Image (cartoon, rainbow, N blue to C red):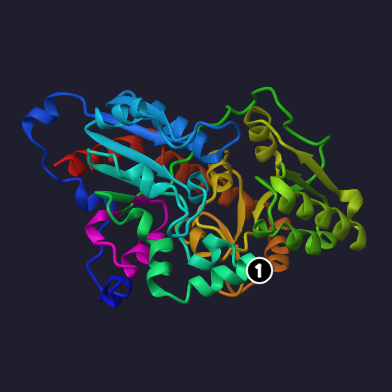
Amino acid sequence: MPASRIAPPRQRCYHADALMSTQSSPEQQDRPLRIALLTSTRERCGIAEYSRHLAAALARLVALDVVPVDPQPLTPDTFARLNAADVIHLQHEYSFFGSALPGRSLLPRLLRPLRRPWVVTAHTVGRAEEILGVARTGWRSMAKRLALRARWVRWYVEAGPFASARRVIVHGSHARERLIAAGLRPERVVYLPMPVPPVAPEGAPGSASLCGERYLLTFGFLTPEKGIDQVLEVLAEYPGLLVVAGETRGAVGKGYLAQLQSAARALGVAGRVRFLGYVSDDCLDPLIRGAELVVLPYRSGTGSYALGRALACGAPVVASDLDLFDDYPCTARFGRRAGQSLREVIRALADAPERRRALGEAAREYAARHTWETAARRHVELYRAAAL
């Protein structure tokens, strides 16, 4: 891949609003667009849940066909459904296609038969090392590090899946900047703020409290990247519980849970930690509202469903200083860039109910501005632009 595609010169910045004025033909405006939404429909899958919310909002605005991305390879009948649409919208996650590496990813095989313009939502955007998991030990990681010495392989992993899309939707401004730096055209990479999910109304049945206890809450799949061990290290100074809601996935997740349980015992806080496992959304929402703070101490990542749900519930959120949280000024931040540690932030907020209330109000204001209905209208404008 030519160097100019990997490190292009600085270009103009485009936000979704800059594309809203794109004009479509009267014929297109007179009938609903036909959209094929190609996505995961798995149980307990964050992107499947995301797609269900998007589909419900889009169904009022377009003629929508939700097409499962699994199992692969797709059948001829499935490709016929996709090519019957005006625009195909792919929800992309690397794990859907087996691998991110050239020659091993199933994505090119999926894209080749498409005859209609396609749009993609890039749910993971990051450095190739993070995408491929090369920080882990073993010969596989060593082989991946060697492969990434070739600049075209790095480009293929980081930007290749999105290069031929008419529009690339990202939910973080830093993700947009990264894809443009990798060579994608700025006008095709569009930042749309992450919509917040609908949540159970206050007072709905559920596990609204833990017998009146004060508690910190973190939730989502348990992986080392979530950084929950950092909360254990400061729990001794917090006058309450730590509640961890979420299940494990695979050997890595199970190993991390065992590590957390061992660390809690070693730190002398095991009696104040509650591992709840999987919690359904109906029970999770009141649990979020009852928390003194929702803590998201992530070490890496490019998106957070947990953040959106916490904001929708009006919870005060403490988050790490990762780039992915930079678009959410309604959160309290910790880390090197933030200039304060997790210990300092939790200590300060635990003793300041008025500050927690202010964070909760800011969360509710964000949620009111970023609904799925608003996001669906912006998607339709992007579909029309892509169909031209």
Residue 11 image point, x, y percent: 23, 70
Circle 1 packing at 10 Å, graded few (<14), some (14-19), many (20+), is: few
Residue at x 11%, y 38% (from the top left corner): 24
Indicate whether residue 171 is drawn in magenta.
yes
Residue 62 image point, x, y percent: 27, 26
Confirm whether residue 217 shows in the render. Answer: no
Residue at x 7%, y 31% (from the top left corner): 26
User: How many numbered circles are shown?
Assistant: 1
Image quadrant where residue 385 sits:
top left
Residue 114 image point, x, y percent: 27, 39
Q: Which residue is tagged 1? A: 139
Residue 300 image point, x, y percent: 58, 62
The quadrant the C terminus occupies is: top left
Q: Which of 83 and 245 lies nearest the eye of the viewer?
A: 83
Residue 243 in the figure: left or right of residue 355:
right
The quadrant the N terminus occupies is: bottom left
Helix, strand or loop under label 1 = helix
Q: Which of 170 and 82 lies nearest the eye of the viewer?
A: 82
Confirm whether residue 312 shows in the render. Answer: yes
Residue at x 80%, y 59% (from the top left corner): 232
- Amino acid beneath label 1: Trp
Residue 262 in the figure: left or right of residue 222:
right
Q: Is residue 40 above or below residue 18?
A: above
Image quadrant where residue 141 sits:
bottom right
Residue at x 50%, y 44% (from the top left corner): 96
Indicate whether residue 38 is drawn in magenta.
no
Residue 77 in the figure: left or right of residue 328:
left
Read off the magenta span: 169-189
Image quadrant where residue 337 sits:
bottom right
